[in-house]
Image: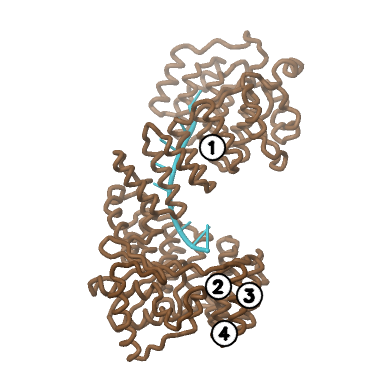
DNA sequence: CTAGGGTTAG
């Protein structure tokens, strides 16, 4: 019998187990480039995979389960119609115990039902989550003499996949005498879903070599496992060759993968070629832009989608909320909120809504959403905690974490970023250390660079520069630009010129074009009146052709976005704004405001006039907000750069003078100005 | 018997 196996069928029994990752550059590429010989059966695959541990599971002793003996006389007679019928009956009633009982009886009498009955039984096991019973059915189907059809083995494989027993599924798959497109696709999609991308792609290679043609199911599954652009391009052209690019599943998968690999132009062109519309394909392209911070394009597409007659669903709205979040469009976000009410129980959608309110600085709404959510996962809690922390409500954030410990899910690494941020914000050094140490000890979360970053920020605020340096040396990962910039920020606040120089040099070594490092360095030199060094920094910038990104602020008034860019006078009311600004500065000067000229140097490349900081974009936006919004309305501004010290002081004073609540969101933090103080505690 | 889109930080 073994001889028989070896001679006649072994090429079909080749295990499809996967070579180690380093084994080949791109097997997919090789196979696809030699495409065209799909009908040819390639039998030469066994060699390099013989050593795999999976092969151990293929010992000849187990092989007798398979039907490769070719001796059809071994097949026993089918069960009496009554037994098949009662099996089907119990399965349809989802009565698994009694169905299994029938199976017992059949086994005693050494009879078998037909494939349909077994597949129903397997469905029944799946519905009950009955792994043990499923395995019994498996044994029964392969018991002496019965030859399960490919269809039935596929069903079994699918069962193991659904039970998340991929190992079992693969063993069964390896042992199949014949694999059809469904067999391959089931395994590929199993690996794809399990994020075992390597395995999924390799299986596709073996599938090609086995002469089985992938269909749209296969492609849409394997695409999601594609991690390399070169592979994706090859797959894409193969898909076009076989004419499957118009399948909506394939199209949405293509868009997703191009987007995941950052190829938005490619994603767009795949989208644009769509003839027959499909709402998931729309959702895919909208998500692509929303996830890549192109909120404008996402919103634009959303409008086109509505115009094309497609209704938005949970997925659409989630992406739209994300677009609102990245553009800080609170008012539009509120309108989307109305649409969200229709999908009240959707966790992901609620999380996105929660985040939108946090990021747009409306904590009252965020808390309302959070408290109303019936289901909350680790993302809901993390979002709320980080939202509170970033908006300056550190104690509330930490209290929420305490209740999360009691009645919430297990915190993850992102939760801790919020916690440490809160400690940092409130200057809670010892608490910060406790949380930092507890991450690993209590929750098994290894601190990553971001967590070190939060701790550094915390130490920096407390002025503990030496401890910062010590911690940087303790880090289990290489310090990056952000790490050193945190140190540089602390040095600026503490006027430690020497350490600042050290940090800045580290940054510029890693990234010689880091604008921020130059600007911060020059500001530190300027503050200590070291003008020669200031000039040197400026020269270095000029040589490298580095320009500071112009400051820009946005404010939403009456559903319109008004942008203010430093030095740009195109706003229709710019003259009136400047007049009002000068009036405010006069009044504030009378109340003790002294413009902080150290920050003039933030605009190195601009005009070096003493009063250039007077026209910083956030000042214009604040004044415009005061002019155009009723007194009780919160003025919300979004900035592309960190706010400068002078504008920060200005905002605090004007919030008090005008009895206004002003919220400014910079790329990292939020500043809530009220009654002459800022939620950031004057450290950012 | 096999396939799709969405959420937290940096």
Disc ID at residue A273: none
Q: Which residue is mark 4?
A: A495
The chain painted brown is: A
Q: In this rendering, which labeled residue sits more in front, label 1 or label 4?
A: 4
Sequence-wise, which precedes: disc 1 or disc 3? 1
Image coords of residue A9 (percent x, y): 69, 18
- Measure the alpha-carbon separation of dots 1 and 3: 44 Å
- Measure the alpha-carbon separation of dots 1 and 4: 53 Å
Write the residue at 63% across / 69% down: A508
Q: Colour of chain B?
A: cyan
Q: Secondary structure at mark 2?
A: helix
Sequence-wise, which precedes: disc 2 or disc 4? 2
Q: Is residue A137 visible?
A: no
The answer to whether marks 4 and 3 mark residues whose Cβ atoms lie closer than 8 Å is: no
For mark 3, name the chain: A
Quadrant of the rendering where the N terminus of chain A is positioned: top right
Sequence-wise, which precedes: disc 1 or disc 4? 1
């Amino acid at each position: 019998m073994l001889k028989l196996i070896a001679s006649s069928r072994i090429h079909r029994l080749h295990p499809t187990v996967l070579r180690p990752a380093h084994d080949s550059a791109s097997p997919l590429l090789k196979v696809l480039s030699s495409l065209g010989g799909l009908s040819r059966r390639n039998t030469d695959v066994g060699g390099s995979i013989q050593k795999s541990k999976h092969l151990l599971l293929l010992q000849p002793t187990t092989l007798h389960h398979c039907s490769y003996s070719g001796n059809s006389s071994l097949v026993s007679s089918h069960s009496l119609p009554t037994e098949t019928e009662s099996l089907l009956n119990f399965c349809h009633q989802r009565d698994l115990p009694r169905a299994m009982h029938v199976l017992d009886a059949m086994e005693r009498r050494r009879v078998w039902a037909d494939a349909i009955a077994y597949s129903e039984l397997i469905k029944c096991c799946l519905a009950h989550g009955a792994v043990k019973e499923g395995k019994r059915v498996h044994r029964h189907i392969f018991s002496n003499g019965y030859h399960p059809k490919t269809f039935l083995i596929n069903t079994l494989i699918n069962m193991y996949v659904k039970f998340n027993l991929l190992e079992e599924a693969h063993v069964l798959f390896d042992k199949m005498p014949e694999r059809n497109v469904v067999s391959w696709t089931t395994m590929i999609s199993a690996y794809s879903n399990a994020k075992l991308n390597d395995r999924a792609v390799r299986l596709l290679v073996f599938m090609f070599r086995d002469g089985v043609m992938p269909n749209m199911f296969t492609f849409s599954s394997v695409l999601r496992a594609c991690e390399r652009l070169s592979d994706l391009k090859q797959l894409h052209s193969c898909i076009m060759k076989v004419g499957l690019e118009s399948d909506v599943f394939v199209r949405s998968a293509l868009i997703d993968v191009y987007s995941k690999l950052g190829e938005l132009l490619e994603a767009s062109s795949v989208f644009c070629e769509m003839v027959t519309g499909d709402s998931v394909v729309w959702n895919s392209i909208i998500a692509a832009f929303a996830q890549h911070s192109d909120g404008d394009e996402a919103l634009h597409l959303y409008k086109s989608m509505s115009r094309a007659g497609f209704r938005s669903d949970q997925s659409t709205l989630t992406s739209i909320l994300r677009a609102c979040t990245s553009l800080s469009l609170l008012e539009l976000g509120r309108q989307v909120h109305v649409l969200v009410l229709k999908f009240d129980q959707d966790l992901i959608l609620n999380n996105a809504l929660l985040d939108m309110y946090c990021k747009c600085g409306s904590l009252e709404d965020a808390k309302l959403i959070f408290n109303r959510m019936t289901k909350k996962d680790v993302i809901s809690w993390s979002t709320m905690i980080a939202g509170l922390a970033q908006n300056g409500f550190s104690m509330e954030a930490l209290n929420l974490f305490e209740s999360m410990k009691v009645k919430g899910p297990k915190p993850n690494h992102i939760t801790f970023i919020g916690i440490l941020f809160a400690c940092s914000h409130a200057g809670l050094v010892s608490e910060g250390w406790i949380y930092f140490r507890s991450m690993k000890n209590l929750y098994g979360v290894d601190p990553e660079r971001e967590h070190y970053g939060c701790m550094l920020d915390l130490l920096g605020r407390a002025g503990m520069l030496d401890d910062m340096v010590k911690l940087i040396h303790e880090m289990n990962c290489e310090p990056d630009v952000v790490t050193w910039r945190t140190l540089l920020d602390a040095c600026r606040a503490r006027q430690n010129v020497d350490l600042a120089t050290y940090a800045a040099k580290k940054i510029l070594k890693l990234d010689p074009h880091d604008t921020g490092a130059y600007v911060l360095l020059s500001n530190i030199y300027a503050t200590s009146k070291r003008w020669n060094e200031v000039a040197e920094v400026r020269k270095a910038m000029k040589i490298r052709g580095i320009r500071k990104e112009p400051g820009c602020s946005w404010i939403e008034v009456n559903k319109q976005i008004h942008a203010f860019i430093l030095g740009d006078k195109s706003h229709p009311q710019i003259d009136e704004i400047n007049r009002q600004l000068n009036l405010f500065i006069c009044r504030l000067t009378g109340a003790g405001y002294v413009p902080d000229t150290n920050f003039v140097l933030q605009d190195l490349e601009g005009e070096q006039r003493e009063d250039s900081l007077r026209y910083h974009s956030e000042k214009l936006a604040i004044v415009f907000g005061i002019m155009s919004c009723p007194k009780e309305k919160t003025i919300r501004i979004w900035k592309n750069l960190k706010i400068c010290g002078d504008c920060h002081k200005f905002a605090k004073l004007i919030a008090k003078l005008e009895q206004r609540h002003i919220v400014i969101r910079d790329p990292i933090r939020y500043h809530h100005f009220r009654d002459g103080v800022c939620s950031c505690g004057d450290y950012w």
